[in-house]
Image (cartoon, rainbow, N blue to C red):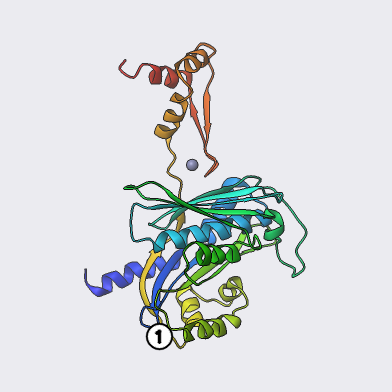
């Protein structure tokens, strides 16, 4: 493909939700950033999330998007599960390597007063608990690791996860700004990691750069793109962009999967429903869609060869 065709495709991707991936300091730093307003808005609309839960779920979804995009294996899936004793109860997010993410909250409708800093109290909503990261590779057994929540604000918890489970010094920023009408105004995040063999001076350099960063949503409000955010965080460290990719809320549920779920109820149960003229409903937790199977469709399921 000629370079100008690639540029046009890139420009189109950069207009919507997207991620950029890059490196700095001769490969000793790897970084990724995302803007995902529409993705979080879709989750808000699908699940009817309150502003607090939009922020909690949105932060975890963006973490999932970025972690999925950092994998080398295109078939790998990542699932992030937060379980806490706060009123939200828990969050579940699944993302792939292609910028697609889906997720839900145990209770999407929780409201709490703003925290002491005047922000949505995500840490209070989740409470004390755990973060579990499950990596699913088609060729091997799923690999999972669990860490205690540090603050329940998601960014800190993921940074702790990377440091404890993977022994990779990591800085994570994720933020969602909710408008007064509960729609999503801004959503974005970044992950910056020090690769094995990094020079110790990079720790101080990065800390100094990050000190000036108030929050991701402030940077987005100033009009910064993911590229500009990484250039800002990695200033003086020779940031090189490697890739831009789209991001979206996507759930792969469909009629066929719904049929399989109904079949799992067992033949007796299905015959009973057909006799009573009942419609089967399969609810997808991830996207909130309801799939319906009429008595005729159930009959067809029972007699696949007819
Ligand atoms: Zn679904």
Q: Is residue 270 above or below residue 83?
A: above
In this orientation, which residue lies closer to the viewer: 189 or 143? 143
Q: Where 117 falls versus 254 (above or below)?
A: below
SS at mark 1 in the image: loop
Q: Residues within 10 Å of mark 1 (few under 14, many from 20)?
A: few
The single residue placed furthest to the left in the displayed view is: 1
Is 88 left or right of 263, judged from the image as shown? Answer: right
Image quarter where the C terminus lies is top left
Query: How many badges with numbers are in the image?
Result: 1
For this rendering, which residue is in front, 153 or 304?
A: 153
Residue 152 image offset from top left, x and y in percent: 65, 60
Image x and y of residue 276, in percent: 54, 12
Q: Nearer the viewer, residue 1 or 122?
A: 122
Residue 134: percent from left, percent from top: 47, 51
| Residue at (47% x, 84% y) in the render | 200
Q: Residue at x 59, y 55 (%)?
A: 57
Instruction: Indicate left or right for 273 with 2 as reference.
Output: right
Looking at the image, can residue 123 be seen? yes
Identify the residue at the far bottom of this view. 236
Picture quadrant where residue 12 is located: bottom left
Q: Residue at x 33, y 67 (%)?
A: 9
User: In the rendered image, which residue does mark 1 sit on?
Assistant: 238
Q: Residue at x 69, y 49 (%)?
A: 85
């Amino acid at each position: 493909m000629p370079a100008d065709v690639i540029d046009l495709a890139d420009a189109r991707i950069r207009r919507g939700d997207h991620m950029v991936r890059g490196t700095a300091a001769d490969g000793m730093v790897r970084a990724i950033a995302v803007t995902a307003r529409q993705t979080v808005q879709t989750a808000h609309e699908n699940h009817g999330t309150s502003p607090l839960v939009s922020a909690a779920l949105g932060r975890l979804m963006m973490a999932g998007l970025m972690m999925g995009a950092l994998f080398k294996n295109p078939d790998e899936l990542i699932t992030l599960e937060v379980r806490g004793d706060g009123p939200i109860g828990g969050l579940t997010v699944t993302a792939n390597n292609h910028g697609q993410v889906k997720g839900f909250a145990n209770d999407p409708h929780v409201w709490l007063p703003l925290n002491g800093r005047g922000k949505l109290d995500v840490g209070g909503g989740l409470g004390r608990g755990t973060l579990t990261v499950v990596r699913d590779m088609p060729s091997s057994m799923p690999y999972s690791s669990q860490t205690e929540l540090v603050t329940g604000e998601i960014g800190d918890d993921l940074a702790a996860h990377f440091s404890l489970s993977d022994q990779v010094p990591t800085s994570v920023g994720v933020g969602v700004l909710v408008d007064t009408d509960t729609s999503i105004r801004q959503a974005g995040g970044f992950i910056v990691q020090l690769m094995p063999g990094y020079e110790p001076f990079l720790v101080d350099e990065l800390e100094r750069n990050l000190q000036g960063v108030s929050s991701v949503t402030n940077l987005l409000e100033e009009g910064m793109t993911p590229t500009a955010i990484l250039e800002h965080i990695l200033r003086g460290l020779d940031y090189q962009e490697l890739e831009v990719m789209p991001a979206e809320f996507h759930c792969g549920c469909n009629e066929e999967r719904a049929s399989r779920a109904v079949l799992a109820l067992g033949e007796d149960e299905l015959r009973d429903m057909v006799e009573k003229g009942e419609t089967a409903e399969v609810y997808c937790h991830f996207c909130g869609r309801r799939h319906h199977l009429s008595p005729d469709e159930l009959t067809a399921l029972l007699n696949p060869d007819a």
